[in-house]
Image (tube, helix red, strand yellow):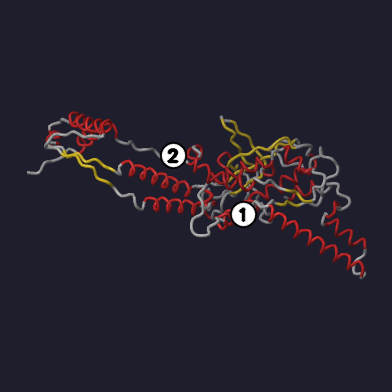
């Protein structure tokens, strides 16, 4: 005769209240707020991109440099890049004294930029009004944006005052068929966060395997009949007494008709499985395992240099494609300020410091190469002047254009700053 088991009674009798309850889905924002890997895959590339700061070539009087520090531009762009990776977009709005936020920038009346405000794309919505001239580059783009600053407070901002940073590329058809902003991009964490959850689950499973490496098996006579008779509490108490005795005395005492054995489980393959989860997470984030998890490179003669090169290439893309346009726009607005000294550089460009930390030997070799290159230029100019191919004035103009030996182009008054700001 086959005995029917009451499954609910079995779980209640053997496990009691020790069972694990299910977990509810958590949003990307809440996961990011937890930090750890969720925070690292968002923050690390953004922070690395801006960690070395920038150099503005041609800013001989450090006018731009001082303003970048005053306005905390590097911190603002770092924050915006983080929100771009998390939400798919962000924007910086300079607070200036040229007019109201809902009016176009008056580039000839910018007295001073007071501060920079950073907003993620979930705080920004486009109002219905759009540019409708198909001959213009801004055709179909919103004229006004509404910014939600929290607690029910909102304000309207003219598009000329909003400096956007798009996330990863999204198909145009997808943006047009959804409620997304026309410059919205793809979040960098959608797939990454799923992989992190899988990885954390694999760690939890590995931990459970370690806990159950030596699994006790209690063969209890009359178990099925006791459950059938509704004696779950008695069964649970009996199981608890055995566990308690084993935990205190490392000895198990059971009825002579019962049996208690310990089964030893193998741990082989667990390390390899966890590593594969790490590799999958690395692939979804473009951050090498050695950097994301702080692991030493594996294999013979492994230095990890290839990993760092790959990571630095990705970060350089963030610098050039996302941060640099924002910096150029902000610097042009900085130079349009009337409160700055009159001597403003008209000819400037951004130089990104190397992400790679050079050794003293490597630094010396770089300096030696630069000195040799400069000497070659001087010798070439000397020969050109000596043969009459160039005049001394032309040679001087070349040195000024290259900002060599402390020289700079004449007549740098910053008069073109307002015009340039309005075109960027």
Q: Is residue 95 above or below residue 392?
A: above
Up-down relation of residue 245 to residue 74 (above or below): above
* Label 1 crowd (10 A; few <14 / some 14-19 / many >=20): some
Real-space CA distance between mark 1 and mark 2, rounded to the nearest whole angstrom: 30 Å
Q: Which mark is residue 317?
A: 1
In this rendering, position of residue 98 left or right of residue 167: right
Q: Is residue 195 left or right of residue 129?
A: left
Q: Residue at x 89, y 62 (%)?
A: 395
Quadrant of the frame with the N terminus: top left
> Element under label 2?
loop
Task: Give the label, 1 or 2, closer to the camera.
Answer: 1
The answer to which quarter of the image holds residue 362 is: bottom right
Residue 40 appears left or right of 1: right
Q: Residue 404 bears which disc, if any?
A: none
Of callouts 1 and 2, the N-terminal one: 2
State the residue position of label 2. Answer: 26
């Amino acid at each position: 005769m086959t005995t029917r088991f009451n499954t609910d009674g079995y779980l209640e009798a053997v496990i009691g209240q020790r069972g694990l309850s299910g977990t509810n889905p958590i949003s990307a924002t809440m996961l990011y707020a937890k930090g750890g890997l969720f925070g690292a895959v968002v923050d690390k590339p953004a922070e690395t991109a801006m960690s070395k700061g920038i150099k503005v070539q041609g800013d001989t009087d450090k006018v731009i440099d001082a303003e970048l520090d005053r306005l905390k531009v590097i911190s603002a762009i770092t924050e915006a890049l983080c929100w771009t990776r998390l939400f798919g977009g962000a924007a910086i709005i300079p607070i200036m004294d040229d007019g109201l936020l809902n009016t176009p920038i008056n580039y000839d009346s910018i007295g001073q930029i007071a501060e920079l405000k950073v907003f993620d794309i979930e705080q920004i919505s486009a109002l219905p009004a759009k540019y409708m001239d198909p001959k213009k580059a801004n055709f179909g783009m919103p004229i006004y944006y509404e910014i939600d600053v929290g607690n029910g407070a909102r304000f309207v901002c003219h598009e000329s005052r909003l400096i956007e940073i798009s996330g990863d590329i999204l198909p145009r058809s997808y943006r047009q068929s959804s409620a997304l902003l026309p410059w919205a991009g793809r979040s960098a964490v959608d797939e990454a966060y799923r992989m992190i959850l899988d990885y954390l689950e694999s760690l939890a499973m590995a931990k459970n395997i370690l806990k159950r490496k030596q699994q006790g098996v209690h063969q209890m006579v009359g178990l099925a009949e006791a459950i059938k008779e509704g004696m779950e509490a008695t069964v649970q108490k009996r199981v608890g007494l055995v566990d308690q005795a084993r935990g205190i005395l490392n000895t198990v005492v059971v009825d002579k008709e019962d049996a208690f054995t310990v089964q030893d489980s193998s741990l082989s393959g667990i390390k390899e499985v966890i590593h594969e989860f790490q590799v999958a997470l690395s692939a979804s984030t473009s951050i090498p395992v050695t950097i994301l998890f702080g692991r030493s490179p594996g294999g013979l003669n492994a230095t990890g240099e290839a990993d760092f090169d790959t990571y630095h290439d990705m970060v350089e893309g963030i610098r050039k494609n996302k941060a640099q346009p924002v910096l150029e726009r902000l610097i042009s607005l900085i130079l349009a300020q009337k409160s700055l000294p009159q001597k403003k550089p008209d000819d400037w460009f951004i130089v990104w410091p190397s992400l790679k930390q050079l050794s003293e030997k490597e630094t010396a070799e770089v300096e030696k190469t630069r000195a040799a290159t400069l000497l070659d230029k001087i010798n070439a100019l000397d020969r050109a002047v000596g043969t009459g191919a160039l005049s001394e004035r032309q040679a001087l103009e070349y040195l000024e254009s290259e900002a060599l030996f402390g020289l700079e182009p004449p007549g740098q008054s910053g008069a073109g700053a307002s015009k340039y700001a309005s075109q960027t």
